[in-house]
C-alpha cells in the first residue's frame, strides 16, 4: 500500500519501470553484507532467493526458466476518509477445554497518517448456527490496527451435523456456512463509512497426530491427520494428495475454469489433499474457494524453497487473506530448506531467525487455529504451544543425537 495524497489533484501519469529480475537478484545479493546460499536452477549466476517472486520462474527440474517480469494483477486506487477496512477475517476453532466450537471475526483498519482522530470501529457478523457477534474497538494510531471478537460457545450438538468434512472422510460433505459482516466507522456519533462483506467459513477440528513409535519413541513418531469430533469420535484421515505447482509458467494464464478442472480431477481420483508447494506462489483466492467447496485439504507452504533467504517478512498479508478458508489445515515454513540450515552455524542462525523467530512467531500472532510444520521435510517440534508461547524445534533424529534448540 502506498499513500498518494499529493497526486490526487489534477492530471497524473504513472510510469513503471521493470528491471530484469535475474539482474536484480544478482545486484541485491551483491549488496547483502554476506553470502546467502541459493542460486538459479538454469540461471546459474542468478540469486533467485533475493527476488520475492515464484522461485520456479528461474527454472526447476520440471519447468523452464523464463523469469517473467511485469504486472499480472489489478492495481487499484482506493480513496477513503481517515480510515479504511483492509482485512475482514472470520475463523472457526474448537476448544478442547470446554468441548465447544467458536467463531471469531478479526477486523483490521488502516488509519491514514495525515489524520489524527479517534475513531470507533463497529463490527457485526451474522452466520447460521452462530449467535451474532457484535462489538467495537477504538482506532487511534496511524497505520494498521486489528481487533478480534469471539462468538458465544457453540455446543457440538448444534454444529457437528454441519461440519466441513474432507472429501472421502466422515460423511464426505464439506459444509460451508455463509457469514455476512458489516463494519461501520464512526467519528463520535457521525458515521464516516461502512463496509460489508460475505465470506464462507467451515467448522472442523483437524489435528496432526504424533505418537511415539517403539519403546520410548525410539522408532520415531507417527504423522497423520485426524478429524476429532464429540458426536462421532476421532476419525483418522488417510491423506491422499498431490503436489501443486504453478498452473502455468505464465501465471496470469491460469483461469478459474482451468483450476477447477485440475482440482475436480484430484477429487475424482479419490484425493483429499493438495500441497501448495513452496517454490511457486500463494494461489489466488478462487483456488482456495474451490478447495473449500470440493473438500480438498490444503498443506500450505510459505514461499521459500531449496535455498537460504535474507531475513524478511511476508507472513501477515498471506495469513490474513487466507485465514477464513477451512480447507487450509496446516502452515509449513518452507520446501526442503531445513537441511541447508543445519549445514553450518551461520546457516543455522539465519534459518532459525527467519523461520522460527519471524515466520512461526508472526504466524502465532495471526493464526493459532492451525498447526505449523517447520519445513518439508522436518522432524517437527518437541514443543509447539502458541498459547504458552513455547516452541522448541526438533533437529536431526534420535539416532544422530542432534535433537537440540539452536541458541541464537
Image (cartoon, helix red, strand yellow):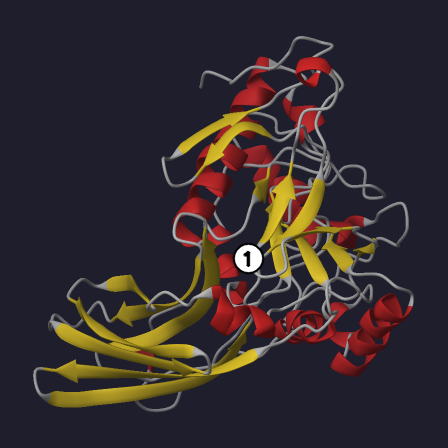
Quadrant in which the C terminus appears: top left
Q: Is residue 91 left or right of residue 152?
A: right
The correct choice, above or below, for 349 with respect to 376 in the image is above
Viewer-side residue, 39 vs 107? 107
Viewer-side residue, 226 vs 144? 226
Q: Residue at x 77, y 41 (%)?
A: 40
Q: Position of residue 177 (x, y in %)?
A: 54, 79
The residue identified by callout 1 is: 230
Residue 4, visible in the rendered structure: no
Viewer-side residue, 25 vs 95? 95
Residue 287 placement: quadrant: bottom right
Quadrant in which the N terminus appears: bottom left
Residue 381 placement: quadrant: top right
Q: Position of residue 358 (x, y in %)?
A: 46, 39
Q: Position of residue 18 (x, y in %)?
A: 62, 63
Q: Is residue 306 left or right of residue 249?
A: left
Structural crowding at the residue carrying mark 1, measured as other residues with C-alpha within 10 Å and reported as few (<14), some (14–19) or many (≥20): few
Residue 273 placement: quadrant: bottom right
Q: Residue at x 43, y 84 (%)?
A: 197
Q: Is residue 341 left or right of residue 382?
A: right
The correct choice, above or below, for 376 with respect to 282 in the image is above
The tally of labels here is 1
Residue 401, visible in the rendered structure: yes
SS of the residue under disc 1: loop
Q: Residue at x 69, y 40 (%)?
A: 47
Viewer-side residue, 389 vs 340? 389
Q: Residue at x 54, y 51 (%)?
A: 370
The correct choice, above or below, for 377 with respect to 197 in the image is above
Q: Position of residue 270 (x, y in %)?
A: 88, 64
Amino acid at each position: 500500500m502506498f499513500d498518494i495524497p499529493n497526486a490526487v489533484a489534477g492530471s497524473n501519469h504513472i510510469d513503471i519501470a521493470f528491471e530484469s529480475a535475474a539482474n536484480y537478484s544478482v545486484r541485491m545479493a551483491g549488496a547483502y553484507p554476506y553470502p546467502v546460499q541459493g542460486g538459479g536452477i538454469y540461471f546459474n549466476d542468478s540469486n533467485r532467493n533475493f527476488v520475492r517472486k515464484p522461485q520456479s520462474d528461474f527454472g526447476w527440474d520440471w519447468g523452464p526458466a523464463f523469469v517473467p517480469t511485469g504486472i499480472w494483477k489489478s492495481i487499484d486506487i482506493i480513496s477513503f476518509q481517515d480510515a479504511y477496512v483492509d482485512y475482514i477475517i472470520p475463523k472457526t476453532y474448537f476448544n478442547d477445554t470446554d468441548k465447544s466450537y467458536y467463531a471469531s471475526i478479526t477486523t483490521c483498519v488502516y488509519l491514514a497518517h495525515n489524520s489524527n482522530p479517534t475513531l470507533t470501529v463497529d463490527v457485526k457478523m451474522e452466520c447460521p448456527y452462530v449467535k451474532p457477534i457484535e462489538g467495537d474497538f477504538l482506532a487511534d494510531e496511524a497505520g494498521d490496527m486489528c481487533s478480534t471478537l469471539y462468538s458465544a460457545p457453540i455446543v457440538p450438538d448444534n454444529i457437528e451435523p454441519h461440519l466441513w468434512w474432507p472429501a472421502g472422510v466422515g460423511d464426505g460433505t464439506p459444509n460451508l456456512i455463509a457469514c455476512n459482516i458489516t463494519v461501520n466507522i464512526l467519528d463520535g456519533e457521525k458515521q464516516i463509512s461502512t463496509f460489508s462483506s460475505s465470506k464462507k467459513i467451515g467448522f472442523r477440528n483437524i489435528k496432526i497426530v504424533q505418537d511415539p513409535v517403539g519403546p520410548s519413541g525410539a522408532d520415531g513418531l507417527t504423522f497423520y491427520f485426524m478429524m476429532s469430533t464429540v458426536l462421532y469420535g476421532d476419525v483418522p484421515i488417510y491423506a491422499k494428495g498431490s503436489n501443486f505447482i504453478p498452473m502455468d509458467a505464465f501465471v496470469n494464464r491460469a483461469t478459474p475454469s482451468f483450476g477447477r478442472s485440475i482440482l475436480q480431477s484430484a477429487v475424482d481420483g479419490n484425493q483429499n489433499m493438495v500441497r501448495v508447494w513452496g517454490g511457486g506462489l500463494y494461489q489466488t483466492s478462487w483456488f482456495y474457494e474451490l478447495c473449500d467447496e470440493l473438500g480438498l485439504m490444503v498443506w500450505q507452504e510459505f514461499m521459500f524453497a531449496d535455498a537460504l533467504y535474507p531475513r524478511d517478512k511476508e507472513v501477515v498479508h498471506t495469513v490474513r487473506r487466507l485465514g477464513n478458508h477451512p480447507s487450509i489445515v496446516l502452515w509449513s515454513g518452507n520446501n526442503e530448506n531445513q537441511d541447508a540450515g543445519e549445514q553450518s552455524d551461520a546457516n543455522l542462525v539465519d534459518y532459525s531467525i527467519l523461520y522460527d523467530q519471524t515466520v512461526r512467531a508472526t504466524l502465532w500472532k495471526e493464526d493459532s487455529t492451525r498447526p505449523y510444520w517447520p519445513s518439508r521435510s522436518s522432524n517437527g517440534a518437541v514443543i509447539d504451544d502458541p498459547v504458552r508461547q513455547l516452541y522448541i524445534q526438533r533437529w536431526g533424529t534420535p539416532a544422530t543425537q542432534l535433537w537440540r534448540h539452536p541458541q541464537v
